[in-house]
């Protein structure tokens, strides 16, 4: 029995090596020259909607505005991603807001629609912005289903592919690749920026085409959750700014000097619950008790019933008679409540919710928006007390916590 066998091995001659070397050199040179042209695809479809990727630089935005005016577009959508650098000093929350301001600064006066993704989207952002663009179209069913994407350089082919995937087969999608001024396209391999951009897209684009198969419903659900969470966080930041600003704050100067921001539970969408409302406005108006002699007049508007962790709960929603015809406050119902966090984690006297007057028998009750009465901040305020019927048998660890003086 033999363990080893002998086989002939073919190898190139010097002429063969020369031909192989020439083939590699010529192929490599063609690859270097053609790669940028392949990635920087230009194929507009003469749509009426121009979608500008909101992360592009100002010089691209200016040329996009010129392209919009010269090609008879009827509307513009600007995509956006969260601003995650210098966000505490930037006046904008995402690049869509900044891009819209840039376009308006340079004289754009038409309506600009925004399609910005929330802060919980960390990966596959181009695909997610495509889904946000589709949501804008879903809100305007009369628009024709075609778009031209305005992108930059070697990112364009991947943008085209991912937008086609996000928008679906019913859309006609075109692409405009604005030249990238950060490197010379013909000799991209001679600069660090060019090498990084082109090699990244040469890997990312085939990967997206071959291996990127997202769960569309899961991504859409993540976007919806993210938008809700961002709305909660934004409202809290706005309240902090309002109370810190001497022109808008109800605090005295001494109270502002000691103000360090409000204290909140971590946003939790488990405490955004769907409630049934049974409207009954037949009860006569009554004076609602406060912690002072003030007695504002309210009327019962209806009963809210909902579940919190499998426990059936009920709250009464009230309407302020004095503000019933107010253009803003007249559209809201007042829902004071106490729960089992009161006294330990939240203000012992209870918290408030303001909800829009519903136009159906169901509405969303978001306890992440629960706020303290002004009495939690200073004794000089007069605040409605929570009626006995609005004492909840469960803990609601959502919304505003105790104020730290």
Image (cartoon, helix red, strand yellow):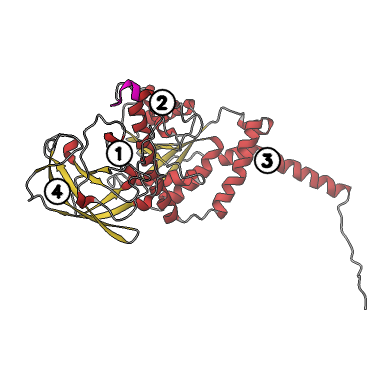
Residue corresponding to mark 4:
301
- Neighbours of disc 4 within 10 Å: few (<14), some (14-19), many (20+): many
Q: Which mark is first along the chain, 1 or 2?
A: 2
Residue corresponding to mark 3:
30
Q: Is residue 105 above or below residue 370?
A: above
* Image spot of residue 372 (x, y percent): 30, 39
Q: CA distance from mark 2 to mark 1?
A: 38 Å
Q: Is the Cβ of the residue at disc 3 closer than 8 Å to that at disc 1? A: no
Residue corresponding to mark 2:
102
> Closer to the camera: disc 3 or disc 1?
1
Magenta stretch?
249-255
Q: Residue at 58% of width from left, 38% of height from top?
A: 37
For the question of whether residue 31 can be seen, the reply is yes
Q: Which mark is first along the chain, 4 or 2?
A: 2
Q: Quadrant of the N terminus?
A: bottom right
Badge 2 marks a residue whose secondary structure is helix
Q: CA distance from mark 2 to mark 3?
A: 39 Å
């Amino acid at each position: 029995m033999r363990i080893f066998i002998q086989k002939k091995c073919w190898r190139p001659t010097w002429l063969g090596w020369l031909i192989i070397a020439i083939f590699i050199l010529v192929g490599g040179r063609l690859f270097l020259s053609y790669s940028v042209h392949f990635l920087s695809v230009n194929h507009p479809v003469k749509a009426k909607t121009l979608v500008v990727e909101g992360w592009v630089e100002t010089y691209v935005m200016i040329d996009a505005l010129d392209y919009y005016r010269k090609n008879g577009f009827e509307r513009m959508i600007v995509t956006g991603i969260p601003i995650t650098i210098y966000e505490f000093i930037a006046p904008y929350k995402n690049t869509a807001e900044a891009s819209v301001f840039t376009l308006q600064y340079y004289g754009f006066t038409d309506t600009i629609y925004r399609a910005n993704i929330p802060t919980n989207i960390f990966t596959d952002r181009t695909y997610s912005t495509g889904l946000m663009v589709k949501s804008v179209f879903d809100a305007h069913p009369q628009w024709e289903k075609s778009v031209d994407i305005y992108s930059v350089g070697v990112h364009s082919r991947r943008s085209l592919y991912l937008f086609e995937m996000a928008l679906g087969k019913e859309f006609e999608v075109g692409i405009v690749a604005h030249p990238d001024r950060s490197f010379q396209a013909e000799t991209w391999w001679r600069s660090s920026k060019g090498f990084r951009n082109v090699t990244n897209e040469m890997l990312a684009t085939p990967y997206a085409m071959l291996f990127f198969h997202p769960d569309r419903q899961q991504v859409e659900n993540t976007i919806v959750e993210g938008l809700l969470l961002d709305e909660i966080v934004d409202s809290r930041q706005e309240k902090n700014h309002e109370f810190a600003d001497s022109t808008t704050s109800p605090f005295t100067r001494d109270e502002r000097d000691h103000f360090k921001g409000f204290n909140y539970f971590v946003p939790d969408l488990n405490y955004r619950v769907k409630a049934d409302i049974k409207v009954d406005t037949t009860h006569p108006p009554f004076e609602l008790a406060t912690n002072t002699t003030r007695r504002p007049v309210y009327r019962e508007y209806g009963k809210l019933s909902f579940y919190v962790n499998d426990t059936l709960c009920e709250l009464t929603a009230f309407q302020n008679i004095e503000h019933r015809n107010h253009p803003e406050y007249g559209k809201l119902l007042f829902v004071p409540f106490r729960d089992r966090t009161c006294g330990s984690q939240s203000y012992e006297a209870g918290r408030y919710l303001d909800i829009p007057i519903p136009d159906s028998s169901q509405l969303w009750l978001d306890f992440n928006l629960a706020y303290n009465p002004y009495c939690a901040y200073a004794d000089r305020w007069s605040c409605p007390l929570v009626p006995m019927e609005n004492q909840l048998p469960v803990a609601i660890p959502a919304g505003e916590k105790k104020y730290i003086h």
